[in-house]
């Protein structure tokens, strides 16, 4: 299990990557990498759900707000 601070450290250290599916969805929705990072690093970021038995690895549904004020949910898989 990982904490929100642990997820933030991964993002800050640029130790994250996107699945092909995530890249496709980001392109369709015109979401930039910087916006995803803003959401996770925002002060109001929170882990909404924890899925320990997810298909590939434990995952975390997070919520946060971009600098521009856009609300966003991100699913993060911890390998």
Image (cartoon, rainbow, N blue to C red):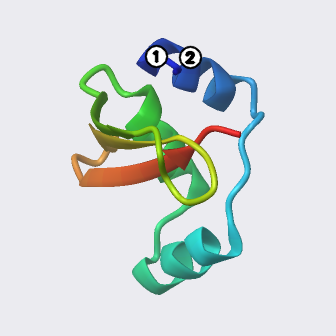
**Residue wearing tag 1:** 3
Residue 6's disc number = 2
User: Which of 29 and 6 lies nearest the eye of the viewer?
Assistant: 6
Query: Residue at image x 49%, y 52%?
Result: 54
Q: Are marks 1 and 2 in contact (CB under 8 Å)?
A: yes
Question: Residue 51's quadrant in the figure?
Answer: top left
Q: Residue at the front extreme?
A: 53
User: Which of 9 and 57 lies nearest the eye of the viewer?
Assistant: 57
| 55 left or right, relative to 52 | right
What crowding class fits label 2: few (fewer than 14 Cα within 10 Å), some (14-19), or many (20 or more)? few
Q: Check the picture and name the quadrant holding the C terminus.
A: top right
| 14 left or right, relative to 63 | right
Numbered label tally: 2
Which percent across, then down, holds residue 77? 58, 46
- Kindly report the distance in space between the C-alpha atoms of the residues bearing marks 1 and 2: 5 Å
Depicted 22 relative to depicted 55: above or below: below
Depicted 70 relative to depicted 2: above or below: below
What crowding class fits label 1: few (fewer than 14 Cα within 10 Å), some (14-19), or many (20 or more)? few
Which percent across, then down, holds residue 68? 29, 48
Query: Residue at image x 50%, y 78%?
Result: 25
| 30 left or right, relative to 63 | right
| 20 left or right, relative to 66 | right
Query: Residue at image x 74%, y 24%?
Result: 13
User: Which of 40 and 67 lies nearest the eye of the viewer?
Assistant: 40
Residue 40's disc number = none
């Amino acid at each position: 299990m990982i904490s929100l601070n642990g997820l933030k450290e991964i993002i800050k250290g640029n130790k994250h990557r996107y699945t092909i599916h995530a890249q496709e969805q980001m392109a369709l929705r015109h979401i930039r990498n910087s916006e995803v990072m803003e959401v996770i690093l925002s002060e109001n970021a929170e882990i909404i759900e924890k899925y320990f038995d997810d298909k590939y690895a434990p995952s975390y549904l997070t919520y946060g707000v971009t600098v521009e004020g856009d609300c966003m949910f991100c699913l993060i898989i911890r390998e």
